[in-house]
Amino acid sequence: MPADNLLSLKDDMIAFIAGHGLRRMPAYVTEEVPTVLFEDDDADAWKDFVEHAKAAGTPFITMSEVVLEKTDVTLLLEQLRDHTFSDDEEIDMDDAETLVRHIGKAGYLQLGFAHQGVMFLFETSTEWYDRFQDLMEAASEIGGLVVDDRDE
């Protein structure tokens, strides 16, 4: 699996899902829905997840991705630059600025299927995406900036 871009993994997932005779529905499952998170550290764990979905008799799998957009990085950097941080607040602007090199890359993928009133989810993300989320959380705490384009 590529360390900094999940687009080829997404393509593999699409082919594998179709190969198992399942349909794919573009949808993001929010935190408000009762969920069970599939946990496995194996790089191919998502294949097991798809096979579990098929065994459960689901007709489709939800799939969502987040691709880092230039506007997301620009808004984040502006918000962080406009704030004066105290010594105990640790925001590394150089770290935030390195996000620019990830524009256009997929950093997060979510697969899901419903079974007996619960959504079962598989999620994977890159290190830079996790850092982006941490920075977004810090920015929202200091100024209310919230960017969530998972539904696009």
Image (tube, grey):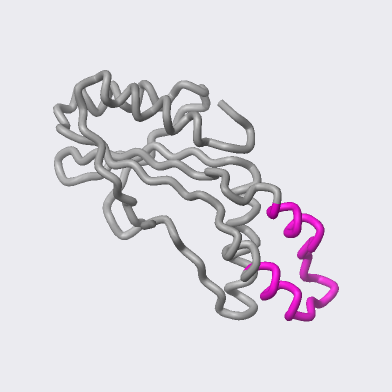
Residue at 37 percent of width and 46 percent of height: 64
- What is the span of residues highlighted in magenta in the rendered image? 76-100
Q: Look at the picture and state if 95 lies above or below 37.
A: below
Residue 2, percent from left and from top: 60, 29
Residue under the image location 29 percent in, 46 percent down: 26
Q: Is residue 146 magenta?
A: no
Between 26 and 93, the one lying in front of the other is 26
In the rendered image, residue 85 lying in the magenta stretch gets the answer yes
Q: Residue 130: horizontal and vertical position, in percent?
A: 60, 49
In the displayed structure image, the side of residue 37 where residue 43 appears, left or right = right
The one of 47 and 63 positioned closer to us in this rendering: 63
Q: Residue at x 52, y 71 (%)?
A: 146
For residue 110, what is the image quadrant? top left
Whole-percent x, y for residue 53 in the image: 24, 28
Q: Residue furthest right?
A: 87
The C terminus: image quadrant: bottom left
Pick the quarter of the image with the N terminus. top right
Q: Mainly helix, strand or loop, the magenta region? A: helix
Q: Can you tell which quarter of the image residue 120 is in? A: top left
Seen in the picture, residue 63 relative to 22 is either above or below; the reply is below
- Residue positioned 28% across, 41% down in the render: 62
- Quarter location, residue 19: top left
User: Residue 62 vs residue 68: left or right?
Assistant: left
| Count of residue discs | 0
Front residue (pair 99, 45): 99
Q: Is residue 32 left or right of residue 132?
A: left
